[in-house]
Image (spheres, helix red, strand yellow):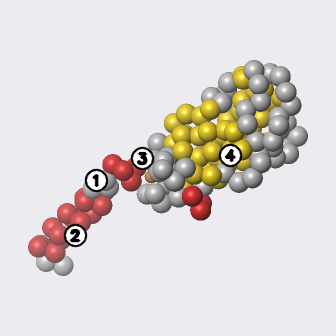
Amino acid sequence: MNTARLIAAAIFALAGFFGAPPAARAHAFLDHAAPAVGSTVPNPPPVIHLWFTQELEPAFSWVTVSDKSGASVSDGPAAIDPSNKMEMTVKLKPLPAGTYTVKWHALSVDTHTTEGDFTFQVKKG
Ligand SMILES: [Cu+2]
């Protein structure tokens, strides 16, 4: 390998290391939710809203909501608002009082997947 090719290879390697655009490192994380993460709400919510830090790919993003026994309490699949792809919602069956676990899986438009979970509590069913 001659010197010019070596330098070109070194520049290429450095660009790969430092050159990733900021958006590629952002990913879609949960920004906030309603009911809020870890909150206690007085009445059963008819729907859960999740707001993410990036737009989502609807076909590969989903939310499950389950009760203490692990049974699903969502009413249909999660939907992404076509006018705001950073927002995902899922309808709920009428919830009795209790603690519920929300698990989300997101594929952002930058092709990175992220997932997480949180709980909320319903005081009175
Ligand atoms: Cu990303």
Is ligand 1 within 8 Å of the beta carbon of the residue shown at mark 3?
A: yes
**Of 23 and 94, the residue lying toward us:** 94
Local crowd at mark 2 within 10 Å, few (<14), some, or many (≥20)?
Answer: few
Quarter residue 7 falls in: bottom left
Which residue is under mark 4? Answer: 90
Question: The residue under label 4 is which amino acid type?
Answer: Val
Q: Residue at x 51, y 42 (%)?
A: 52
Q: Give the numbered dot on residue 114.
A: none
Q: Mark 1 highlights which residue?
A: 18
Residue sitting at 73 percent across and 32 percent down?
Answer: 45
> Amino acid under label 3?
Ala
Coordinates of residue 62 in the picture (x, y in percent): 65, 53
Give the mark count: 4
Q: Using a 10 Å C-alpha cutoff, classify the residue at mark 1 as few (fewer than 14 neighbours), some (14 to 19) or many (20 or more).
A: few
Residue 26 located left or right of residue 29: left
Identify whether 2 is placed above or below 81: below
Of the image marks 3 and 2, the number of the one nearer the N terminus: 2
The numbered dot on residue 9 is: 2
Disc 1 and disc 2 in contact, CB within 8 angstroms? no
Looking at the rendered image, the disc whose residue lies closer to the viewer, 3 or 4, is: 4
Mark 1 or mark 2: name the one nearer the start of the chain. 2
Q: Which of the two discs, 4 and 2, sits closer to the camera?
A: 4
Task: Give me the C-alpha separation between circle 3 and circle 4.
Answer: 24 Å
Of the image marks 4 and 2, the number of the one nearer the N terminus: 2
- Residue 50, horizontal then vertical, whole percent: 59, 40
Q: Position of residue 78 (x, y in %)?
A: 66, 51
- Disc with the residue nearer the chain's start (1 vs 4): 1
Mark 4: C-beta under 8 Å from nearest atom of ligand 1: no
Horizontal relation, residue 70 to residue 27: left or right: right
Which residue lies at the image location 68% right of the left edge and 24% below the top edge?
39
Mark 1 and mark 2: Cα distance apart in space: 14 Å
